[in-house]
Image (cartoon, helix red, strand yellow):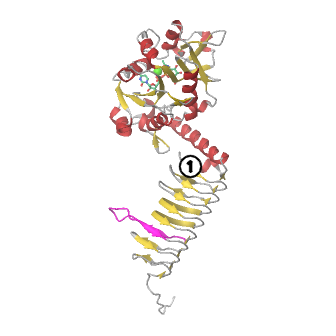
Amino acid sequence: MIIDGEDKYVMTVIMAAGKGTRMKSEKSKLVHKIYDKELVKRVTELAKQVGSDEVVAVVGHLREQVEAVLGDTVKYAYQDELLGTGHAVMQAKKYLQGKKGKVVILYGDVPIIRKETLENLITKSYKNKEYATLLTAIYENPTGYGRIIRDEGGNIKAIVEEKDANMYEKEIKEINSGIYCFDIEELLSSLEYIKPNNAQGEYYLTDVIKIMNDKGLKTGAVIVEDNTEILGVNDRAQLELLTRVLRMRINAEHMRNGVTVEDANSIYIHDNVIIGVDTVIHPNTTIKSGTIIGSNCEIGPNAYIREGCIIGDNVKVGNCVELKNVKVGNRTKIPHFIYLGDTEIGEDCNVGCGAITCNYDGKNKNKTVIGDRAFIGSNVNLVAPVTLGDDVLIAAGSTITKDVPSNNLGIAREKQENRPYNKK
Ligand code: UD1
Ligand code: CA
């Protein structure tokens, strides 16, 4: 990570050995998805986004599932018995040893922390030369969390777990999020001193704060501004809540950037979507990761924009339209009941109601290419692979199986015949 123009070493250790009993699931909690991404994957990507040089996942329970999701994007440490958060970090010792720099501790089930919050934590830790920098929060109801003990000067002294806290300590509203930035060497040496002599009989990572203080090493904290960032997932209701929080956060970002959202409650815009100014998103619209939409477009209602779409400016993607891997030129109109997949469509086109691409032949996905100023009539089937030139007109109801050159009318349907008919 670059701090003040200097490249500083940062490692991230992700705790991912937990059981997740309350999910009532055959699957590891960590591979449940928030939007379309596994919890542990989202946390891993976050660690990479803040510029971690190495990421280590401490896995245990159902570790093969976590490993299947993360593959070789991280290194693995194993914790066979859950003996506490300190014990979990100790399992990553072989990766930490001999390194100079910082280690960030994250939980695999705390997935919506902001990248900026972590950057701020690491930067503060480096700049203030702190051996431990905690991410804390002020909670009206702090029950269940570790409490932050400060002296009269406001300096952090220790963290006391709920189960070990006395009645005065229980009154403290500043809680430990469980996310920290440590000096690697001092963390390793402090971990040698932690003992499971507490109410839970666990090796508490939190004990290193007092150990560092006793050694006279400087520690500090960053208080998180938005408490929702440090929420964790323990059951499916919390998973739903966090998905909602993330969704509203993303919607708000787009609105701040000049996008009109009619009803944020019904809009599902995933991560990493770019939308130009003055585009309007109508209700019940889902836009998947990686989509790029230009300015001044109308999207929805009931639009489903899936992976791999790049949409130009002044485009209309209307009611009940599904797009997958589609490139759309400027000013093209795709107004209602349309499916386009694996398609490139040029500028100033109009796609009629009910038109679809038949992009899948049961084995392969095939491509449809449509030039500029094409007019695709209603209820047309474009059987891919197929290419339509510029300025083509495709007659309504046609099933197009052959290419249509520029400036041609493509028509492929039975001629109408009228026969005498007597309604008795
Ligand atoms: C921990 C902190 C507490 C903090 C809280 C925030 C300690 C001792 N306490 O408490 O101060 O307020 O987090 O949520 O650290 N895990 C492992 N291996 C273990 C134990 C835990 O991988 O041996 C993982 C869990 O799966 C979970 C995370 O670490 O993702 C936190 O564990 P949890 O038992 O929930 O911590 P708390 O006791 O709540
Ligand atoms: Ca616990």
Q: Nearer the viewer, residue 162 or 408?
A: 408
Q: Which residue is pictured at 55% across the width and 62% down the height?
A: 320
Extreme residue toward the bottom, this view: 420
Position of residue 340 relative to residue 6, above or below, is below
Q: Position of residue 106 (x, y in %)?
A: 48, 28
Q: Position of residue 227 (x, y in %)?
A: 61, 30
Q: Magenta part of the protein: which range?
A: 352-370
SS state under label 1: strand
* Ligand 1 within 8 angstroms of badge 1 C-beta: no
Q: Position of residue 55 (x, y in %)?
A: 42, 31
Q: Is residue 290 visible?
A: yes
Residue tagged 1: 268
Asked whether residue 155 is drawn in magenta, I would say: no
Q: Nearer the viewer, residue 116 or 175?
A: 116
Query: Splitting the image into 4 quarters, where does residue 100 fall?
Result: top left
Extreme residue toward the front, this view: 5
* Amino acid carrying mark 1 in the image: Tyr
Which SS does the magenta portion mostly show? loop
Q: Is residue 230 visible?
A: no
Q: Which residue is pictured at 50% across the width and 73% down the height?
A: 379
Q: Which residue is pictured at 52% across the width and 18% down the height?
A: 132
Asked whether residue 355 is drawn in magenta, I would say: yes
Q: Position of residue 21 (x, y in %)?
A: 42, 30
Position of residue 147 relative to residue 339, above or below, is above
Query: Splitting the image into 4 quarters, where does residue 366 fall?
Result: bottom left
